[in-house]
Amino acid sequence: MVIIQVYITNAYRSYEIADFYRAKGCYVCLGGLHVTSLPEEAALHADSIFLGPGEETFPEFLKDFRNKTPKKRYFSSVRTLEKLPPVRRDLIKREKYMVPNSIVVTRGCPHHCDFCYKDAFFQGGKSFYTQLVDDALSEIDRLPGKHLYFLDDHLLGNQKFATELFDGMRGMNRVFQGASTVDAILRGNLIEKAAEAGLRSVFVGFETFSEENLKQSNKKQNLKKDYELAVQRLHSLGIMINGSFVFGLDEDDQQVFNRTVDWAVKNAITTSTFHVLTPYPGTKLFQDFENQGRILTKNWDLYDTRNVVYQTKNISSEDLKAGYDWAYKEFYSWNNILKASLNHDSVKHQLKHLFYSGGWKKFEPLWNFIIKTEGLNKMLPLLESLLSKVKYEQKKEFSQIKTNSKLIEI
Ligand code: SF4
């Protein structure tokens, strides 16, 4: 049996592998984001396809398969993480990974941004749910070492769950990375609890500075949010930031690249991930562009957020691509890495920024060598030391935020 999880950019390769094994008589299962978005396309290359999350459907399929009655299509309608067996981490060849302790304790996200895959993947059932806190803590406890990488879309998305999780993690001597929205960083004191539990680096979807773009993308949670205050708050807690930015939204013009890189450098964002807006099939954005005749190609290999696949509005597609390439080059120039590092208050934070950002982006041949020689795991202590705690001082403005959120809660 061959089982492949299909993403849009590996879809054609997955289909090739699937066809190859089917021709040899293997039973082929395909699932994942792309299969859920385009089941008819995927079904041509599989014996069974899986739509949505697989926690319930895969065991059901295995039962059917043993009884020799497998179905062509399995659709996930039960959405729960309760009573799941523990992940078989003993099967993971830990020495081959720099980050062997990746973990997911929630599914989905409470928000509904138009360009995000989330709603397409979870349609027909709950689109945000969590593990039981005790189960999540036991899973963390089973993981050896110190470093964890939470791959949850929005680790702080459920306030009650996240509060209990972070409270439970205090004293576990972990350092971890995860993702959050600006909104959750500014609200209440959850981010302080995360920092106390060991959060040292966070992925934040800033995406755009334009209110109009945010509205058009249904990214309501970022509307009227003070990005700089969120950044200061994270820095005051010693948390590094990986900022995500999207180029090519309808209100963007030629200035967007400069504006974004300048802001990221000025605000000492440690690493930035830039994206060309990409209308993934199954999303509302794709549907809108399709209705407006703006989809230029359905070659999924180009849907990698580096290429322009739709008709742009205030900026030409050539300028968008060139601006995107320029932004990466400019943000990761030594000059800007140094400038951004120096925008931190403490020397320790400046050095961490310099090593993390420089080390990540400026030594790619070295990383390739380490990967080829299977030495990635030996780099983990280095990553852990870069994620060590930076002493911080809580600034006045943040007590103000707390007061405000208290008032809002009342
Ligand atoms: S906040 Fe992030 S994960 Fe959630 S819907 Fe928006 S883009 Fe997707």
Image (cartoon, helix red, strand yellow):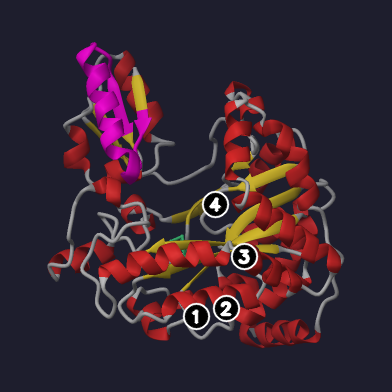
Chain part drawn in magenta: 4-30
Q: Which residue is mark 2?
A: 263
Quadrant where ligand 1 appears: bottom left
| C-alpha span from label 4 to label 3 | 14 Å
Query: Between residues 234 and 135, which one lies in front from this camera angle?
Result: 234
Q: Which residue is mark 1?
A: 259
Would residue 342 be found to the left or right of residue 270 on screen?
Answer: right
Please tell me which of labels 4 and 3 falls first in the chain.
4
Please tell me which of labels 4 and 2 falls first in the chain.
4
Please report contact status of discs 2 and 1: CB closer than 8 Å, yes or no.
Answer: yes
Please tell me which of labels 3 and 1 falls first in the chain.
3
Q: Which residue is mark 3?
A: 159
| Vertical relation: 14 (above or below) 93 | below
Quarter of the figure with residue 36: top left
Q: Is residue 289 visible?
A: yes
Identity, as a three-letter code, of the amino acid under mark 3 = Gln
